[in-house]
């Protein structure tokens, strides 16, 4: 039709509109029933296809109406600008959108453009984050290396060698049992040997560095791999206890100076062993009780019931001595050196491969002459004999005001050679039935001295148990604790802090004669 233009969906084309109409345009109006389906328009007429059956026709009353209807139409619309131009001017019904293909292409292009923008933004950001992480790791590594260099300038001379830098496998000689392995794999390069701090008959002890932390490294001689296997196995069942030396990890093939060692890595304590500690300094009565009680707690934990899964275990140490007890910074003890230990559930361990277990100086009489009845309880009683000697060492180095203090000495130091054999100890302990000399400054009535003597009795069943020793020491420690907030109590403490603590015999009988 003359003067008419067809507008489809999203079409913005239109014919030129009259700028100054001389008269209003008459249009057919589908909704104007009162005016005989006629309307008067300022601009023009429109005919819109709303659906296949529905058509709407009417007037364009102004610029805004014209733009909404014609230029931004959401339906098929014909707009025209002459009178009655929309009478027979009806847009055809189109079943498919003619612009689907072009629209899809346009959307695809937009998606690609958006992907490119996102990639352009986030790729540099991801690279930047990765660089920051790498730089942090490198910085941390350099810082750790510099720390080692500053703290240990001779580190390069004691660093171990590793064949091919291979991973060292952890070893657990009870791998066939239900016990979980204690140690995990670790790289040989992570462990540095710094200073030799102990050199025993069966192993060397080094101060080491592992991931920047101080550790103690115990290198077992190649001929003592059975002790290494046993110590790792025992640590697998011993559990976590504050008075047991904590094993961190172990290696069955640690290469150092072209020799392959078995080694265990434990927590490091700057005070060293109890032997080293009381060699260097004396202790007061509170420190004495702290050392003795914490060591007794560790031994009581081993001798008691250790729960793991659905089983309970008890452990006999079989090598209690001051060199196997470590002193922590808070002056409490942690028991280590479990290479000779036995577990009551492992029946094969009771039949010892070696005739004598432990250190001859600390061996109980029944161990020395091999008359021990090979049961688990027998080895626990032998532990108590050895623990009595350790208590004697601590008491000997306890300083008391106004008293002359003896120099440090090992048990039986004045009766046997510096490195006694089993035969040397049998002559003194069994044939002569001697025990270390008790200083005169500890009266015969002292409960501590009585406890020591009850531990090293010749008759093994008569010895105190570790639980009884722990309870007695705990009660005695409570008696000598200072009360700084109360002057009267402090004065009372000053009186009882003297070493000659006289406790009523009834108290001693009631608390030390309990059956172990």
Image: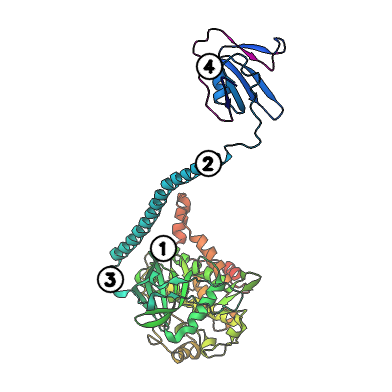
Q: Residue 107 carries which label?
A: 2
Name the secondary structure under disc 1.
Answer: loop
Between discs 1 and 2, the one toward the N terminus: 2
Q: Which quadrant is the C terminus positioned in?
A: bottom right
Query: Could you tell me which residue is drawn at 50 percent across and 87 percent down?
Result: 433
Residue 38 is at least partly visible in this image = yes
Contact, mark 3 vs mark 1 (Cβ under 8 Å): no
Along the viewing direction, whichever of 190 and 263 lies nearer the viewer: 190
| Earlier sequence position, callout 2 versus callout 3 | 2
Front-most of residues 495 and 122:
122
CA separation in Å, label 3 and label 1:
26 Å
Local packing at callout 4 (Cα closer than 10 Å; few below 14, some 14-19, many 20+) is few
Residue on which the image places disc 4: 63
Mark linked to residue 329: 1
Cα gap from disc 4 to disc 1, whole angstroms: 91 Å
The outermost residue toward the left is: 153
Q: Position of residue 259 (x, y in %)?
A: 38, 83
In the rendered structure, find residue 280 and report the number of the disc placed on it.
Answer: none
**Residue highlighted by disc 3:** 154
Q: What element carries label 3?
A: loop
Between label 4 and label 1, give the one nearer the viewer.
4
Instruction: State left or right for residue 21 relative to residue 127.
Output: right
Q: In this view, does 204 lie to the left or right of 79?
A: left
Q: Distance between the residues labelled 2 and 3?
A: 69 Å
**Residue for point 57% across, 81% down:** 379
């Amino acid at each position: 039709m003359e003067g008419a233009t067809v507008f489809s969906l999203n079409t913005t084309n239109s014919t030129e509109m009259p700028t100054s109409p001389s008269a209003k345009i008459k249009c057919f109006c589908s909704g104007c029933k009162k005016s005989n389906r006629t309307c008067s328009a300022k601009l023009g007429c429109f005919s819109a296809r709303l659906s296949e059956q529905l058509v709407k026709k009417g007037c364009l009353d102004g610029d805004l109406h014209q733009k909404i209807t014609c230029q931004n139409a959401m339906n098929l619309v014909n707009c025209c600008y002459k009178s009655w131009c929309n009478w027979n001017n009806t847009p055809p019904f189109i079943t498919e959108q003619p612009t689907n293909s072009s629209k899809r292409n346009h959307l695809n292009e937009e998606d690609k453009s958006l992907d490119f923008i996102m990639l352009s933004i986030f790729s540099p950001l991801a690279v930047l984050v990765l660089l920051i992480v790498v730089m942090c790791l490198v910085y941390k590594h350099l810082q750790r290396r510099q720390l080692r260099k500053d703290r240990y300038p001779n580190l390069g001379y004691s660093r171990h060698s590793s064949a091919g830098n291979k991973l060292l496998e952890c070893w657990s000689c009870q791998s066939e049992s239900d016990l979980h392995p204690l140690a995990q794999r670790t790289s040989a390069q992570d462990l540095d040997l710094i200073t030799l701090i102990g050199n025993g008959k069966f192993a060397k002890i080094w101060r080491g560095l592992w991931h920047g932390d101080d550790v103690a490294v115990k290198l077992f001689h190649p001929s003592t791999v059975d002790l290494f296997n046993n110590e790792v196995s025992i640590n697998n069942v011993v559990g976590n206890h504050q008075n047991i030396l904590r094993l961190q990890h172990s290696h069955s093939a640690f290469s150092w100076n072209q020799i392959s060692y078995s080694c265990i890595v434990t927590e490091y304590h700057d005070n060293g062993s109890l032997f080293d500690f009381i060699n260097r300094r004396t202790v007061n009565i509170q420190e004495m009780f702290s050392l003795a009680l914490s060591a007794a707690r560790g031994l009581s934990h081993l001798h008691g019931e250790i729960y793991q899964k659905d089983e309970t275990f008890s452990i006999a140490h079989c090598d209690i001595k001051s060199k196997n007890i470590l002193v922590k910074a808070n002056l409490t003890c942690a028991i280590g050196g479990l290479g000779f230990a036995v577990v009551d559930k492992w029946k094969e361990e009771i039949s010892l491969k070696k005739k004598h277990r432990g250190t001859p100086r600390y061996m109980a009489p029944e161990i020395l002459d091999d008359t021990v009845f090979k049961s688990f309880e027998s080895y626990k009683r032998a532990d108590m004999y050895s623990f009595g000697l350790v208590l004697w060492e601590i008491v000997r180095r306890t300083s008391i005001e106004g008293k002359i203090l003896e120099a440090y000495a090992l048990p039986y130091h004045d009766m046997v050679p510096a490195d006694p054999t089993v035969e040397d100890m049998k002559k003194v302990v069994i044939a002569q039935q001697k025990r270390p000399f008790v200083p005169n400054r500890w009266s015969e009535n002292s409960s501590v001295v009585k406890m020591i003597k009850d531990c090293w009795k010749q008759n093994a069943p008569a010895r105190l148990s570790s639980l009884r020793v722990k309870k007695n020491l705990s009660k005695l420690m409570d008696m000598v604790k200072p009360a700084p907030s109360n002057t009267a109590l402090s004065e009372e403490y000053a009186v009882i802090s003297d070493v000659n603590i006289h406790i009523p015999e009834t108290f001693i009988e009631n608390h030390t004669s309990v059956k172990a």
